[in-house]
Image (cartoon, grey):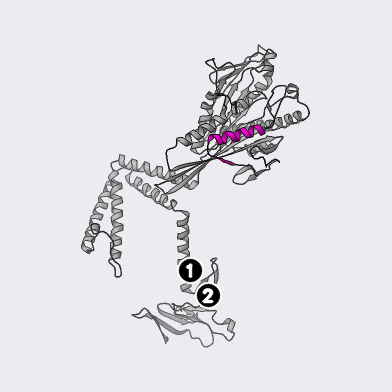
Amino acid sequence: MSGASVKVAVRVRPFNSRETSKESKCIIQMQGNSTTILNPKNPKEPPKSFSFDYSYWSHTSPDDPCFASQSLVFNDIGKEMLQHAFEGYNVCIFAYGQTGAGKSYTMMGKQEEGQEGIIPLLCEDLFEKINDNSNEEISYSVEVAYMEIYCERVRDLLNPKNKGNLRVREHPLLGPYVEDLSKLAVMSYTDIADLMDAGNKARTVAATNMNETSSRSHAVFTIVFTQRKYDSETDLSTEKVSKISLVDLAGSERADSTGAKGTRLKEGANINKSLTTLGKVISALAEVDNCTSKSKKKKKTDFIPYRDSVLTWLLRENLGGNSRTAMVAALSPADINYDETLSTLRYADRAKQIKCNAVINEDPNNRLVRELKDEVTRLKELLRAQGLGDILDNLKDIHNNKHRHLLASENQQPGHFSTAPMGCLTASPSSGSLCSQAGLQSVSSIQERIMSTPGGEEAIERLKESEKIIAELNETWEEKLRKTEAIRMEREALLAEMGVAIREDGGTLGVFSPKKTPHLVNLNEDPLMSECLLYYIKDGITRVGQADAERRQDIVLSGAHIREEHCIFRSERNANGNVIVHVGAM
């Protein structure tokens, strides 16, 4: 999915009461995925055509065979995006258009049967898929958040306690996020529908000349969808987290058309500001992708103005980032809205040039294990296709027999007792050698077959390498901690044997006289200087003398009464394991 373009759809609505009263004419035509707009101010001008992923004709009644219903829009866009969410990708669907063009209807719809929009239909389908899951190894969890961006300020629509404006922060790993935004866990579609209804009632709407229920804010409904799967083969629990962002943008508007004054005028100015910034971001991203595809080199001067608006800052990942994104451009069919409709079409045409680099949101370690397992399966199929399938079983049997033979050999040593089944192992050395010879013969015959098969040797090596890496990656955190602790204890025991004490935090505490190793320490008139030097007496002969002696001295001393070759120590172990040291002059 990496490098996929933003999926763009346009949808034209029926005339509203304002357009009908002004006897407006339809200037939009659709044929397949192509949308054409006519210029009512200059009828002789050639029509402008645009091509999109989907062109939805909803201008007429449902009786029209070309009519695009709410369910059709969801089946084309919503289901595909939901499938990407189940695959582990981040997903975003946002609606854009002038005020009153039908964005909220497309995204939210109405509560009447068959009038539901993309958001409720997607939530319902999400829980249907979860309930249809029969795999006990997979578990799901769903959390939702609902916020609005009103006059460049963020409000929580689900938590009545968060009455104030929430801060937008940026994390180096998580990116932009809203601080203290409520994320509520839901168990069913009923739960999510209740929260959605409560959020819609808290959303800021107002009446304008162009729209009686004009959205005065951008609304972002976010679903955090987590899938946990236990893999019995690798003994790992993998987790994929998808963030589904469903955005209903406020409509762009002109003050003279809407008749906005006072607060409505200020709201419209903020709406237009954020949408203008969104347009600049889309244009900049499209320009970057065009330059990159042509010159294969991105300019250093490219700047994407995400931070110019709260909306674009929060949607940064969804616009050209780690997300699978779809845009629905809502159009007015009326000739009196020609300029706004043409602007929306150009906006949408620009957006389809943006490429998003979506990746599956899973732990890199889990993804590596999954890819290695696929590689192992592919290599095994390759070996079986080349007639070497029985070698895989033979190698496994030889490895198991070798392990059991080594276990039997250890058990036959003094102080060990055999615990192997009688039918599997025998204590006779001759039978053990026969097993070894049979194993060697089978290994040699297998190697001959592998060498004679083209690509067989390389496939076997890659198979062993992949399985070894999988085994290393399958270690749990607890096993890694135990292994680290065991290595640390071995290191401390070795250092303690050498006379070095270790603190609990791993730092060196000091040097002390070892108990089991013969050694010499210095004596000095000053008690603080005594036992500061430690010399080990090794097994066998240890020579003591000066640095300039003819022979190399193991312990080098200096002083008035020290000879070049001063003395030797002979260290031996008796039958009881005790160390006996003999001192002699040179």
Mark linked to residue 492 = 1
Tell us which disc is closer to us: 2 or 1.
1
Q: Position of residue 471 (x, y in %)?
A: 41, 51
Q: Quadrant of residue 47?
A: top right
The answer to whether residue 394 of the structure is visible from this angle is: yes
Residue in the image at 49% along x and 37% along y: 86
Residue 281 appears in view:
no
Of residue 467 and residue 225, the one placed in the foreground of this image is 225
Residue at 34 percent across and 47 percent down: it is 460
**Picture coordinates of residue 161 (x, y %)?**
67, 42
Secondary structure beneath disc 2? Answer: strand
Q: Position of residue 128 (x, y in %)?
A: 49, 33
Which residue is drawn at the image coordinates 40% and 42% (left, top)? 374
Residue bearing mark 2? 511
Residue 132 falls within the magenta-colored stretch = no
The amino acid marked with disc number 1 is Glu
Q: Is residue 525 above or below residue 539?
A: below
Left or right, residue 304 beside residue 400 = right
Quadrant the C terminus occupies: bottom left
Graded by Cα atoms within 10 Å as few (under 14), some (14 to 19) or many (20 or more), the crowding at tag 1 reads some
**Residue at the (48%, 54%) spot, across then down:** 477
Which one is earlier in the sequence, the residue at label 2 or at label 1? 1
Disc 2 packing (10 Å; few <14; some 14–19; many ≥20): some
The residue stretch that appears in magenta: 184-209
**Image position, residue 424 (x, y; %):** 25, 57
**Looking at the picture, which amino acid does disc 2 mark?**
Val
| Distance Cα–Cα, label 2 vs label 1 | 13 Å
